[in-house]
Image (tube, grey):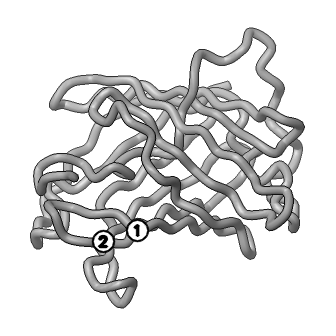
Amino acid sequence: MTTPDAPPRHAGLPMRGAAAPSTTPAAPATAAPAPDGLHAFAFQTGTWRVRHRKLKSRLTGCTEWVEFGGTCTAWELQGGNANVDDNLLDDPAGPYRACTFRQRDPATGLWSIWWFDPRHPTLEPPVRGGFRDGVGTFLADDELGGRPITVRFTWSGITRDAARWEQAFSPDGGRSWETNWVMTFTRAA
């Protein structure tokens, strides 16, 4: 269970993993995910500078944003059926590392995304979804401060050298959304 001032279980970035292998493959020539979902996160392969912007408080009517930098290194696994990334977040409340693991279900083409960081040491249910028309949408049920919410991750603006990730919460089953975290990725290598 989460509290209003603590992040919900899905409070972070797309899952980041262990240190990248020394032979991290180059980014693909095209950023468009395959229609069946295979290699959907190939665009993320490589090293990124990340600009974070997150609401100071979630689902409280807060309009104060906290901004900070970070880095992300990502790579594919399982022949494009999985992806992992390793993040350093220079949060003003204290820097920390986090990781995301993403895996595609070959039967459905849908992706599951798990986020790990030291604030939440247990594995929680993933957000699930996929890409359509260049936008990735991933959803999960969760709770914030003891009340049920829906969590949405959105990937958009994907090019070879840039991408945008957003996290939004809905307290009313998806009728309204509050975007509470935006990550702007700029390729570093």
Residue 167 sits in quarter? bottom left
Q: Nearer the viewer, residue 158 or 130?
A: 130
Residue for point 40% across, 68% down: 141
| Location of residue 159 with respect to 21 vertically, above or below | below
For residue 41, above or below residue 76: below
**Which residue position holds label 2?**
149
For the residues labelled 2 and 1, the Cα–Cα distance comes to 6 Å
Please name the amino acid that badge 1 sits on. Answer: Asp
Q: Is residue 138 above or below residue 118?
A: below
Label 2 vs 1, first from the N-terminus: 1
Indicate which disc residue 141 carries.
1
- The type of residue carrying mark 2 is Ile
Which quadrant holds residue 76?
Answer: top right
| Spot occupied by residue 88 in the image (x, y as percentages of width and height) | 42, 25
Q: Nearer the viewer, residue 179 or 19?
A: 19
Query: Which residue corresponds to the image point at 22% horizontal and 52% vertical from the top-left?
Result: 1
Residue lying farthest to the bottom in this orientation? 175
Q: Is residue 139 left or right of residue 134?
A: left
Number of residues whose C-alpha sits closer than 10 Å to that of mark 1, classed few (under 14), some (14–19) or many (20 or more): some
Would you say 106 lies left or right of 188 here? Answer: right
